[in-house]
Image (cartoon, rainbow, N blue to C red):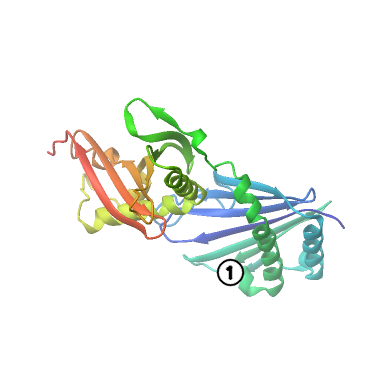
Amino acid sequence: MDIKYIELVTQQSEYEDELTSDVYLINADLILTKTTHWSQYDTADGVREYEAGKGPIADSVSYKIPQSEFDNLQSLIFKNNFFELPEEIADYEVDDGWWFYITVATGNVVHKIGGYEADSDSEQFREIKDAVLEIYRNTLPHLKLNRGVMLSLDDFHITEDDEDYFHCKVEFCLKEIDLCIGRDVDDIIMNNQLFIANELLRNQIEWNNRVRRYVANYILTHDLQRTWGDKEYTAHELEKMLQLECIAVSKEEDEDEGSFTFTFDDDIIFKYHSTGKHEIFVDGNLKDGLNEVDIQSYGSTWP
């Protein structure tokens, strides 16, 4: 019985948070594709808009694997009697944790098993799951070289109204934004800026979630939230309202670590309370994370 494909889906659940799920698909043509999907919550009660592995694609990479790795994985599936394992290994009502699902297809059979913390409830499941992830980890050195988001200086251009930065339009978590790097720097600093920009893109889901949580927490803890009507926004709702416009990367000669700034348009949050333009700036670096929030209002009048 020949296997057509093996699919591993992983998803972590965090109450009142934006989620992603990862799909690792290995087919008989020896192509491994890892796809990251958005899996956003619909309400504060934790109702997801998308099932694991079914939401809009945030990132996808593919790579050719050796025949030997596919053969070893196929042998492992049969050794662990995969097609005899129950479909629901575990099914607990929980708000936090990991869900794992494995699907294996042959010529006429498609068998899917898994559930909450399935790898801890079944040693057979865990062995197959770990083998898929190990194949993926073995491809990482190549994936880093072949990911479409890797940028070079040739991808950036000069704009007439900005003498300090080069600009590039990129897609960041399904939204087109302006990515900027500092001009008039030497080659070492320029390469450092490009490294930071590519790291932010490569880990865009993590940084997107971190920055939005950071801003929402700042607004709430500094009592900056305004209430209108009968509605008061939660941290989760504030995170979703933020509109990312730009990421700027820079490095000074005396800096050990280059820095970056996320710029959000926050007119939606304040539109009932003032006129004019509002922006939120979030500063940080790759080593220390996020360190400052600055909210600016331009030509605003508060009622």
> Which residue lies at the image location 35% right of the left edge and 25% below the top edge?
160
Viewer-side residue, 286 vs 37: 286
**Residue 141 spot, x, y in % from top left:** 63, 55
In this orientation, which residue lies closer to the viewer: 241 or 279?
Answer: 279
Q: Residue furthest left?
A: 303
Instruction: Decide if residue 231 is in sight here.
Output: no
Q: Nearer the viewer, residue 44 or 26?
A: 26
Residue 86 image-quadrant placement: bottom right
Point out the image quarter for the N terminus: bottom right
* Quadrant of res 262: top left
Q: Which residue position holds label 1?
A: 117
Whole-percent x and y of residue 190? 44, 43
Task: Locate the C terminus by quadrant.
Answer: top left
**Looking at the image, residue 150 lies above or below residue 98:** above
Picture coordinates of residue 206, whole percent (x, y): 46, 54
Using the rendered view, name the quadrant where residue 110 is placed: bottom right
Q: Name the residue type under label 1.
A: Glu
Q: Position of residue 169 (x, y in %)?
A: 46, 34
Asked if residue 51 can be seen in this view, the reply is yes
Mark 1, Cα crowd under 10 Å, few <14 / some 14-19 / many 20+, is some
Residue at the limit of the structure toward the top, as seen here: 160
Q: Is 274 placed above or below 74 here?
A: above
Residue at 48% x, 54% y is 19
- Residue 214 to residue 186: above or below: below
Q: Residue at x 32, y 51 (%)?
A: 283
Q: Secondary structure at mark 1?
A: loop
Q: Residue furthest front?
A: 186
